[in-house]
């Protein structure tokens, strides 16, 4: 029992046991949620919005667990591991994420959904303008960007299992996919929200618990930052560029790690060259990330269903009380722990940065606690995947098929189709994840950027602007999405100013939405009365909305 | 359609929209102020050219001082600001009234949306 092999085996078992307990809890919750699904008269109402009955705690935890994905618990910490304190501006937009994410549109969406019986955001938009075109284009955009997100999360889930169970990437991906697709398909939205609540608790406990262990292992924050100030930039070294003084302590940070770093590090030095000298985060790019991280929280396709599902304003208010400190603790904890990583010495190559959190947990925490800490990013990944699966399923079954082709679909058909599509989307995501993209966070940012660039202004106009019309909403949606995709590929202005592609898409979407709505056909009086009402006759000026 | 339920519906819906807009404005102002402060502070103190960087960077609790004052402190302030929004600015929603019967067909005439 005292041989090194036996000790390693014991430690591995100690890591897996709390992890296994967590997984069992997830399945028990899904089973309980499925009982609700069987008892409820309206399958769709229960499967997609949990009968609109969620209180503060479930709203808060399920919103944050869905918003904070594997990106927040693996990708973002891996970037801190790679770029040090220069990540500060990158994450700064999260300081207003709760306020912006729920405070602007939460109440309005919830009320309109109740008034119109909407099960998805697309229902609300389509019904306001009575537009089939919106009913087609909106869900297609949502399916596209959510699929990218799902791919990232499947990769993250597989990598965690690869690390914790010491199995191959393929085996990790298979186990992860089967687990998450099973409980999501089986339990529907209520299972997703309840498991999100458990996952939200596991996430915050895990990530906060890591802080004292990391600080202890690094002999304090001051020692950790001092060690970081002397860190050698591996990309500069590889390319033969000069090392910059305190590159990890100031913006714009060290050189950007290229996607092909693994091949570069194996290539002969004379073949590499110094032609690319990109810094990690120029200030203007940092501002883009502030905007992206705060504004994307509002209209993420995966978080919007929560706004249709809470029961009243009281639940929303209490959720905000919980979320404000929660998000601070979540992101600040990673800034502290991962900036200790250099002093602790994880020994990871730059291309293995996504393994930084599990590796740190294994290094600094006792084995039994490491299991819980590693369960935190896994919980974040699962809670996002289950929501993503349901969003894509709802977009296909409800928004594309039912609303456009079979409005009187039988409940049993809806049930079978929903189960089938949810499972099928999981299988497709599994297939895409087999390609094993090298870095997780760019895919997550692609999702957030795409959502904010294309969905933000059209949705805001629909909810708040009397003058909005379907042409303006479609123009903003298509213009934002196309610009975002093209600017991501070609980056035409990067030689002049470094802004994220999202900024261009976001700006053009806003301009198009405004212009086409302003000069396009006016809405009917009936539409305005239903959605905006009218002031009492004594207060005519208040009608300016 | 009876005039009273219709008028009541219109007024209730209007009060809901007006209140939602008030809340959205509050959030918008806080968001913009946060952007100005955080990006400004970090831009001035956190993006020093290599030649201006001190040999021993100033730390607060082991954190570079620009990150401490430019992110951690405003974030700590924004927590009570969010609580203030939830407690004071965010009002309970108006009751949802049914759309009065007999007027469920969209009107043909265009409206003045201003």
Image (tube, grey):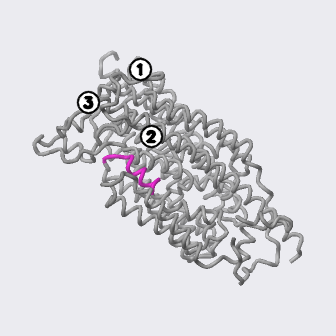
Task: Say whether residue A37 is visible.
Answer: no
The C terminus of chain A lies in which quarter of the figure? bottom right
Residue A440 part of the magenta-drawn span: yes
State which mark lies toward you, 3 or 2: 2
Residue B89 x/y as whole percent: 72, 46
Subunit ID for the residue under disc 1? A
The N terminus of chain A lies in which quarter of the figure? top left
Q: Are marks 2 and 1 on the same chain?
A: yes
Give the residues in magenta.
Answer: A438-449
Subunit ID for the residue under disc 3? A
Q: In the orientation shown, which residue stands out farthest toward the top?
A: A2
Residue located beneath label 3 in the image: A232
Check whether the beta carbons of the residues at disc 1 and disc 3 lie within 8 A of each other: no
- Main SS class of the magenta portion in the image: helix
Q: CA distance from mark 2 to mark 1?
A: 20 Å
- The residue lying toward the viewer, choosing from A346 and B53, is B53
- The residue lying toward the viewer, choosing from A414 and B62, is B62
Q: Are marks 3 and 2 on the same chain?
A: yes
Looking at the image, tell me whether mark 3 or mark 2 is earlier in sequence order. 2
Q: Secondary structure at mark 2?
A: helix
Q: Which circle marks residue A89 in the picture?
A: 2
* Residue at 86% over, 77% down: B1
Q: CA distance from mark 3 to mark 2?
A: 22 Å
User: Does residue A6 appear left or right of residue A523 in this picture?
Assistant: left
Q: Secondary structure at mark 1?
A: helix
Q: Which circle marks residue A222 in the picture?
A: 1
Subunit ID for the residue under disc 2? A
User: Does residue B87 appear left or right of residue A214 in this picture?
Assistant: right
Residue A503 part of the magenta-drawn span: no
Instruction: For label 2, count other residues whose C-alpha is less than 10 Å away and answer few (under 14), some (14-19) or many (20+).
Output: many
Looking at the image, tell me whether mark 2 or mark 1 is earlier in sequence order. 2
């Amino acid at each position: 029992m005292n041989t090194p092999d036996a000790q390693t085996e014991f430690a591995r078992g100690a890591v897996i046991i709390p992890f296994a307990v967590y997984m069992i809890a997830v399945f028990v919750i899904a089973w309980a949620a499925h009982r609700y699904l069987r008892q409820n008269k309206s399958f769709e109402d229960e499967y997609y919005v949990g009968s609109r009955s969620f209180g503060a705690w479930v709203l808060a935890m399920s919103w944050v667990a869905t918003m904070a994905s594997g990106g927040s618990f693996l990708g973002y910490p891996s970037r801190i591991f790679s770029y040090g304190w220069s990540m500060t501006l990158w994450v700064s937009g999260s300081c207003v994420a709760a306020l912006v994410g729920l405070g602007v549109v939460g109440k309005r969406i919830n009320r309109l959904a109740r008034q119109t019986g909407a099960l998805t955001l697309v229902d609300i938009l389509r019904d306001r303008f009575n537009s089939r075109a919106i009913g087609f284009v909106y869900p297609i955009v949502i399916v596209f960007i959510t699929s990218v997100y799902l791919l990232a999360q499947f990769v993250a889930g597989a990598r965690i299992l690869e690390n914790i169970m010491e199995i191959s990437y393929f085996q990790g991906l298979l186990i992860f996919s089967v687990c998450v697709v099973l409980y999501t398909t089986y339990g529907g939205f209520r299972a997703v929200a309840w498991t999100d609540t458990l996952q939200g608790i596991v996430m915050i406990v895990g990530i906060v618990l890591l802080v004292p262990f990391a600080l202890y292992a690094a002999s304090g924050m001051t020692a950790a930052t001092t060690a970081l100030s002397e860190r050698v930039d591996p990309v500069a070294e590889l390319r033969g560029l000069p090392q910059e003084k305190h590159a990890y302590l100031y913006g714009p940070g060290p050189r950007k790690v290229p996607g092909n770093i693994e091949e570069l590090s194996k290539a002969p030095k004379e073949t590499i060259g110094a032609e690319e000298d990109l810094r990690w985060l120029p200030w203007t790019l940092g501002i883009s990330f502030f905007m992206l991280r705060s504004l994307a929280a509002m209209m993420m396709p995966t978080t919007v269903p929560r706004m249709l599902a809470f029961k009243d304003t009281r639940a929303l208010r209490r959720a905000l009380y919980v979320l404000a400190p929660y998000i601070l603790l979540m992101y600040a904890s990673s800034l502290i722990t991962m900036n200790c990583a250099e002093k602790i010495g994880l020994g990871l190559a730059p291309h293995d940065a996504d393994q930084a959190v599990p590796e740190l947990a294994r290094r600094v925490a006792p084995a039994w606690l490491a299991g819980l800490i590693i369960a935190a990013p896994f919980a974040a990944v699962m809670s996002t995947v289950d929501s993503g699966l349901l969003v894509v399923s709802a977009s296909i079954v409800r928004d594309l098929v039912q609303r456009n082709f079979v409005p009187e679909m039988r409940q049993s058909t809806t049930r079978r189709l929903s189960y089938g599509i949810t499972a099928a989307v999981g299988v497709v995501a599994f297939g895409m994840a087999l390609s094993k993209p090298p870095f997780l966070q760019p895919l997550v940012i692609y999702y957030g950027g795409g959502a904010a660039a294309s969905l933000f202004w059209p949705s805001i106009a629909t909810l708040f602007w009397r003058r909005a019309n379907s042409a303006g909403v479609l123009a903003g949606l298509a213009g934002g999405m196309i610009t975002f995709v093209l600017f991501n590929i070609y980056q035409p202005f990067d030689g002049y100013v470094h802004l994220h592609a999202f900024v261009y898409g976001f700006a053009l979407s806003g301009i198009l939405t405004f212009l086409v709505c302003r000069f396009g056909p006016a809405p009917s009086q009936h539409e305005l009365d239903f959605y905006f009402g009218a002031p009492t006759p004594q207060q005519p000026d208040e009608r300016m909305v | 359609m009876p005039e009273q339920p219709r008028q009541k519906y219109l007024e209730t819906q209007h009060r809901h929209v007006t209140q939602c807009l008030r809340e959205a404005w509050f959030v918008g102002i806080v968001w913009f102020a946060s952007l100005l402060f955080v990006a400004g502070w970090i831009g001035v103190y956190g993006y020093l050219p290599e030649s201006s960087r001190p040999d021993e960077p100033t730390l607060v609790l082991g954190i570079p001082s620009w990150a401490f004052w430019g992110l951690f402190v405003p974030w700590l302030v924004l927590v009570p600001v969010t609580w203030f929004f939830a407690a004071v600015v965010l009002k309970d929603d108006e009751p949802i009234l049914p759309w009065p019967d007999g007027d469920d067909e969209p009107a043909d005439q265009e409206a003045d949306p201003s």
